């Protein structure tokens, strides 16, 4: 499939500080793509470069076969056929919902036609009944839908979302996220989402690019980046993990919990990532091998599961079980790793 958006070796710095460094990725028609990373990693700057709000110092940005950005070209934002939903929604406080939704439409179109178009878009996002309301009379979720309608009304080829759910309450955030995702998939529009929330990226996007210090460390499906992280940063950023340095001999890694079969050539001083849920945990029973027990030093109950902090030879590790696996602080247990991934230092 031919990509809709191609970002190739894009670099941007402010003063002498590089913010985005040699970033490359593609977004395909109808795909939801996420840029995931901590504050200051360069993800929002990358989004602004795609939108045309910033000019790249190097690299190219293409939409279909059209060059939006290169050494001699900078297409202005209003000519890029790209919609943008800001983190704070950026609604006009003196305009009602309908006027906000119609704002991006060309003034060459008669006002009646602009408003009809905007009302149709408001209906698609489920808030046409609020078209006469002012922004300050709307909930956070309703304001977000107005911002989304304003961007969709212009029928962009690509929609950019900058931390669109961060200002919503926790309970509302998940429900709104699911509804918005359904709307976007039904519309068939391509989307680039920027977020620092790993759960949001994994549940909302079809592919995820994990950024760190201005660069992309890994791109893949949510399952791939979570289960097969390539670096320590990716492994740690996508949730709790246990990093272990060890050797591999004849397909077996030596770990503090015993031998673990792993599909990797012989190597020394490598790092393994073992997710907390990739352990079995049992009450310790003394055996003829006199294997040293681990000990529960802390536990966290989260309703659907437990996360235990388990100490082995004086070092702590995280283990996650379902809600039925009860262990007490101080209890002796035996851990067995189920799977692990080799990662870069």
Image (cartoon, rainbow, N blue to C red):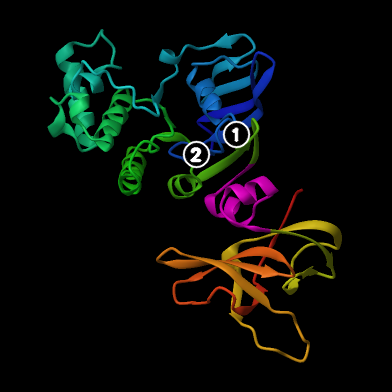
Q: Which residue is mark 2?
A: 33
Q: Earlier in the sequence, mark 2 or mark 1?
A: 1
The residue at 40%/37% (across/down) is: 166
Q: Secondary structure at mark 2?
A: strand
Q: Secondary structure at mark 1?
A: strand
The residue at 43%/63% (across/down) is: 302
Tag 2 near tag 1, CB within 8 Å = yes
Label 1 environment density (alpha carbons within 10 Å; few <14, some 14–19, many ≥20)? some
The picture places residue 22, in percent across and down from the top left corner, at 68, 27
Q: Which stretch is magenta?
A: 218-242
The residue at 57%/14% (across/down) is: 55
Residue 72 or residue 90, whichever sits in front: 90
Name the side, left or right, on which 295 lies relative to 289: left
Q: Is residue 92 visible?
A: yes
In the rendered image, the vertical position of residue 238 relative to residue 162, given as above or below: below
Q: Residue 112 lies in what quarter of the image?
A: top left
Instruction: Confirm whether the magenta stretch covers residue 150.
Output: no
Instruction: Confirm whether the magenta stretch covers residue 233.
Output: yes
Name the side, left or right, on which 196 lies relative to 310: left
The residue at 70%/89% (across/down) is: 286
In the rendered image, the vertical position of residue 118 relative to residue 267, given as above or below: above
In the image, which disc is placed on residue 234?
Answer: none
Name the side, left or right, on which 121 lies relative to 265: left
In the rendered image, the vertical position of residue 101 relative to residue 337, given as above or below: above
In the image, which disc is placed on residue 25?
Answer: 1
Q: CA distance from mark 2 to mark 1?
A: 10 Å
The picture places residue 119, in percent across and down from the top left corner, at 18, 27
Label 2 environment density (alpha carbons within 10 Å; few <14, some 14–19, many ≥20)? many
Q: Residue 266 lies in what quarter of the image?
A: bottom right
The picture places residue 150, in percent across and down from the top left corner, at 29, 24
């Amino acid at each position: 499939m031919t990509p809709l958006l191609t970002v190739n070796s894009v670099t941007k710095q402010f003063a002498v500080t590089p913010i985005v460094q040699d970033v490359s990725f593609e977004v395909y028609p109808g795909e939801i793509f996420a840029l995931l990373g901590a504050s200051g990693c360069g993800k929002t700057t990358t989004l602004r470069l795609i939108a045309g709000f910033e000019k790249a110092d190097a690299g190219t940005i293409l939409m279909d076969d059209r060059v939006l950005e290169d050494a001699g070209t900078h297409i202005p934002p209003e000519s890029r056929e790209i919609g943008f939903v800001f983190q704070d929604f950026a609604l006009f406080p003196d305009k009602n919902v309908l006027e906000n939704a119609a704002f991006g439409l060309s003034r060459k179109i008669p006002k009646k036609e602009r408003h009809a178009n905007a009302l149709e878009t408001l209906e698609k996002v489920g808030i046409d009944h609020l078209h006469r309301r002012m922004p300050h009379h709307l909930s956070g979720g309703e304001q977000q839908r107005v911002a989304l309608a304003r961007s969709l009304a212009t029928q962009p080829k690509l929609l950019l979302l900058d931390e669109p759910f961060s200002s919503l309450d926790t309970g509302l955030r998940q429900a709104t996220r699911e509804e918005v995702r359904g709307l976007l998939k039904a519309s068939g529009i391509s989307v680039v989402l920027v977020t620092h929330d790993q759960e949001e990226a994994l549940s909302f996007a079809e592919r995820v690019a994990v950024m760190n210090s201005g660069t992309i460390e890994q791109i893949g499906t949510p399952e791939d980046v979570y289960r097969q992280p390539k670096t320590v940063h990716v492994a740690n950023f996508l949730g709790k993990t246990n990093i272990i340095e060890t050797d591999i001999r004849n397909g077996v890694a030596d770990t503090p919990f015993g031998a673990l079969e792993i599909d990797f050539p012989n190597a020394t001083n490598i790092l393994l990532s073992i997710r907390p849920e990739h352990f079995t945990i049992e009450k310790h029973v003394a055996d003829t091998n006199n294997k040293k027990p681990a000990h529960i030093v802390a536990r966290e109950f989260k309703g659907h599961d437990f996360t235990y902090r388990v100490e082995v030879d004086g070092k702590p590790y995280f283990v996650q079980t379902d809600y039925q696996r009860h262990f007490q602080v101080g209890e002796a247990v035996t851990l067995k790793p189920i799977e692990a991934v080799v990662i870069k230092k």
